[in-house]
Image: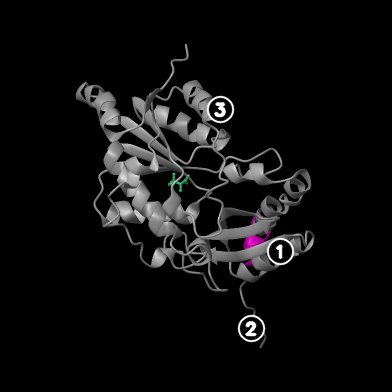
């Protein structure tokens, strides 16, 4: 039987709903979202159901993580289908605050992320990760979950949330889930719905480039980067913002002699839509043969 989730618009409503459940020993899992829910979010909700007794989903398009000229105004707001997906997934509470509830009179203090936010998404979108970290910290304090679940597509965001939890001594456990993909490999994203049919078709080079990287990982970093560029050259309408291979913990770029785990990060623009993706690689540096 599907029971409709309770909709909490204020922190007081949220707490009144959660407190009795918690007093009865219920463990709370939290999935923070900006709405426009898709199968990737549903996988996060399903994981939440495995990890805890009740699942809270927040739906809040957070203005402080969008830069000037970015898509805050046009970000898809799809309340009806979001509600249906939450109900389907057995979500107990949807927390859907407005800007006043989240930020009204409360902007004196915010979270500033350190060097993890310097490169890649942080460099291309100045202030983005401070906005993300601040709203996630606020949502953690509002919901007070035992565990929160994030998708691995936003790899830098996930690393920053983990670092914030460590740095600020939050007690919430952070869980992550592998990226959910369309049948042709494109990572599920709320922004995919901006793509026209031809852009959607061009966007396939992103997952194709990840596959090419994996196929070349045993030949070392240079071969991986060359293989990724070669795939993007087949689709010149897609503009690459960055291709980087980094240490998965520090997000510092690895050198050509790197051996072992590394994370390939890609950001690309398809028309006016910016998409990101990543994959873990097991790199093998090529042995140098010295001729005598
Ligand atoms: O990943 C997202 O959807 C957002 O960045 C988050 C974590 C909900 C914060 O607004």
Kindly check if marks 3 and 2 are in contact, taking CB atoms under 8 A apart as contact: no
Specify the segment rendered in magenta. Answer: 214-220
Horizontal and vertical percent position of residue 273 = 64, 53
The residue that disc 3 covers is: 81
State the quadrant of the C terminus. bottom right
The residue that disc 2 covers is: 290
Horizontal and vertical percent position of residue 257 = 55, 73
Vertical relation: 159 (above or below) 176:
below
Colouring style: one colour
Kindly check if marks 3 and 1 are in contact, taking CB atoms under 8 A apart as contact: no
Magenta span contains residue 257: no
User: For the point 55% across and 56% down, which residue is it?
Assistant: 70
Determine the main secondary structure of the stretch shown in magenta: helix
Kindly check if marks 2 and 1 are in contact, taking CB atoms under 8 A apart as contact: no
The residue that disc 1 covers is: 227
Q: Earlier in the sequence, mark 3 or mark 1?
A: 3
Q: Secondary structure at mark 3?
A: helix
**For the residues carrying marks 3 and 2, which lies nearer the camera in this image?**
3
């Amino acid at each position: 039987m599907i029971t409709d989730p309770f909709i909490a618009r204020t922190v007081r409503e949220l707490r009144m709903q959660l407190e009795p459940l918690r007093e009865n020993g219920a463990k709370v899992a939290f999935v923070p979202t900006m709405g426009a829910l898709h199968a990737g979010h549903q996988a996060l909700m399903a994981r939440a159901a495995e990890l805890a007794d009740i699942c809270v989903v927040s739906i809040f398009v957070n203005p402080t993580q969008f830069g000037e000229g970015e898509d805050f105004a046009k970000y898809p707001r799809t309340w009806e289908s979001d509600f249906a997906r939450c109900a389907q997934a057995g979500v107990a509470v949807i927390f859907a605050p407005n800007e006043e509830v989240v930020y009204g009179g409360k902007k004196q203090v915010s979270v500033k992320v350190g060097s993890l936010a310097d490169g890649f998404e942080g460099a291309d979108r100045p202030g983005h990760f401070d906005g993300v970290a601040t709203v996630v910290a606020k949502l953690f304090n509002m919901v007070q979950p035992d565990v929160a679940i994030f998708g691995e597509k936003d790899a830098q965001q996930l690393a920053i949330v983990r670092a914030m939890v460590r740095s600020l001594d939050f007690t919430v456990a952070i869980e992550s889930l592998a990226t959910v993909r369309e049948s042709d490999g494109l990572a599920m994203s709320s922004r995919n719905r901006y793509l026209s049919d031809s852009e959607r078709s061009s966007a396939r080079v992103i997952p194709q480039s990840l596959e090419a990287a994996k196929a070349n990982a045993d030949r070392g970093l240079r071969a991986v980067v060359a293989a990724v560029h070669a795939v993007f050259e087949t689709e010149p309408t897609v503009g690459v913002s960055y291709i980087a291979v980094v240490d998965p913990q520090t997000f510092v770029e690895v050198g050509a002699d790197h051996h072992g785990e590394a994370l390939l990060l890609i950001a690309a623009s398809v028309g006016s839509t910016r998409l990101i993706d990543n994959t873990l690689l097991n790199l093998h540096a090529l042995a140098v043969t010295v001729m005598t």
